[in-house]
Amino acid sequence: MEKNSEKTGAAKAPKKSANSRFYKIVWRWHLYAGIIFAPLLVLLAITGSIYLFKAEIEEVLYKDYYQVSPQDERAAVTEQLDEVKRLYPDAVVTKYRPGESETRSSEVTISSNGESLTVFMDPYTGESIGELNNDDRIMDKIEEIHGELMAGTLGDRIVELAACWAIVLMVTGFFLWFPKKKTGIAGTLIPRLRKGKKILRRDLHVVPAFWVTGGLLFLVLTGLPWSGLWGANFQALTTNTGEGYPPSVWIGDAPTSNIQTQDIAEVPWAAETLDVPLSAIQGQIPLSLDKVVEVAEQEGIYPSYSIFIPQEPEGVYTLSVFPPKAQDEATIHIDQYSGAVLADYRYENYGVIGKIVAWGITLHKGSQFGLANQLISLFICLSVVFVAISGIYLWWKRKPQNGIGAPAAPALFNTKAFLFLMIGLGILFPLVGLSILAVWLIDWLLIQRIPSVKKWLNA
């Protein structure tokens, strides 16, 4: 019996030691990722919370530009454009947006002296209400911060990196949260309020993190298709696997041009790689916008659409709409001379992935189900802020004065289970893989060779 007990104990010891090493390295990476990316996640959550209410905020900010008094007759679109050209003789008209309701102004986007301006027109009198520099629109600034930190491509990559590492935080956090013993719901599903400050601090981070994980994962995954690297590759994969636009969207022959719709207009995600057809050039006079509006109404496009005006002789009018509901999305190309519809790409034409992404985007923006959608998304965003701040506070209260407070753990390559996990995440999210490689190189080249830094990081 004693010999058997000794053998059993010997067998359990290595297993316990391996579990301990795995736990420590998960904890260590969760801590590092949290310290580095928590501030960015807070910023993204706050800007996302504001952007959820873009329509409502702009209705207040630009009420004087948006609201008009309905009258019996509307001025022709050409009359409105003539007035814009009179006011801005050197400007190039690039886009026209009819008002989606009887009390909504129409918008004419122009390029003037290197600036993009929106001129708001009263569709009844044909007179200008005022102008806005598109670079000064507050909600566009919020969107720019949320999407790329107002830093262009570099900012886009940083945001994508933070989003991908948020998934790593969720995976490692779930492992740390998962109860190792049957302890009931206290400390796992509900916080323990009467176990002292240390326990409460821990529970106020861990328990809300568990509840918000599903919502945060959804927001991250539905936001990634917009990213510059992962999103572009995912979009290319979607198109190349046949889940992109089908041949049925073409009224005639498919175009032979190499121009994609995203190069000439702002269109829904599923239509960005749609090839642009060419207008038949026969010495004709271009179709007036009044006729294009008539075609749009005949086609039954959602009323908040925009018309992108061709700048080349072979160009086409492109109609696109970003409606509250995914199933109302549409992208239409119209011959600028004959008015013929060359391509009509609707939600029902999307492939399975295109439909999923379309729904994901409208849910992400909080518009698919109206106020209920906005409030649920707002709750998730505010919960993310709370979890991130409580996590930083928990670390700050726990850390020693002479170190970062991370547990000592074996090297990444010495823990196969965690190594395979990180490789998998690195393949799925390339920026995560590159950042892990960068961290490993920094550790090998610098941290391990500088005693004071190695001691502070407990490496």
Image (cartoon, helix red, strand yellow):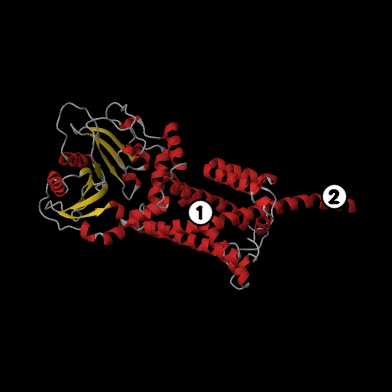
N-terminal label among 2 and 1:
2
Residue 57 spot, x, y in % from top left: 31, 60
Q: Which amino acid does label 2 sit on?
A: Lys
Q: Nearer the viewer, residue 77 or 88?
A: 88
Q: In which quarter of the image is residue 374?
A: bottom left
Hey, which residue is sitting farthest right in the picture? Answer: 2
Please give the residue where the numbered disc 1 appears in the rendered image: 214
Decide if residue 400 is on the left or right side of residue 296.
Answer: right
Which residue corresponds to mark 2?
A: 7
Is 381 placed left or right of 21 in the picture? Answer: left
Instruction: Give the mark count.
Output: 2
Q: How far apart are marks 2 and 1 (CA)?
A: 43 Å
Q: Is residue 337 left or right of residue 158?
A: left
Q: Disc 1 marks which amino acid? A: Gly
Above/below status of 281 relative to 34: above
* Percent coordinates x, y for residue 171 in the rendering: 58, 51
For image coordinates 39% across by 56% down, the residue present is: 373
Q: Is residue 112 above or below residue 28?
A: above
- Residue sticking out furthest to the left: 72
Marking on residue 162? none
The residue lying toward the viewer, choosing from 154 and 238, is 154
Look at the numbered disc 1 and give the secondary structure of its residue. helix
Can residue 222 be spotted in the picture? no
Q: Position of residue 263 (x, y in %)?
A: 33, 38
The picture places residue 279, in percent across and down from the top left corner, at 23, 30
- In which quadrant will I find the C terminus? bottom right
In the picture shown, does residue 249 fall above or below 416?
above
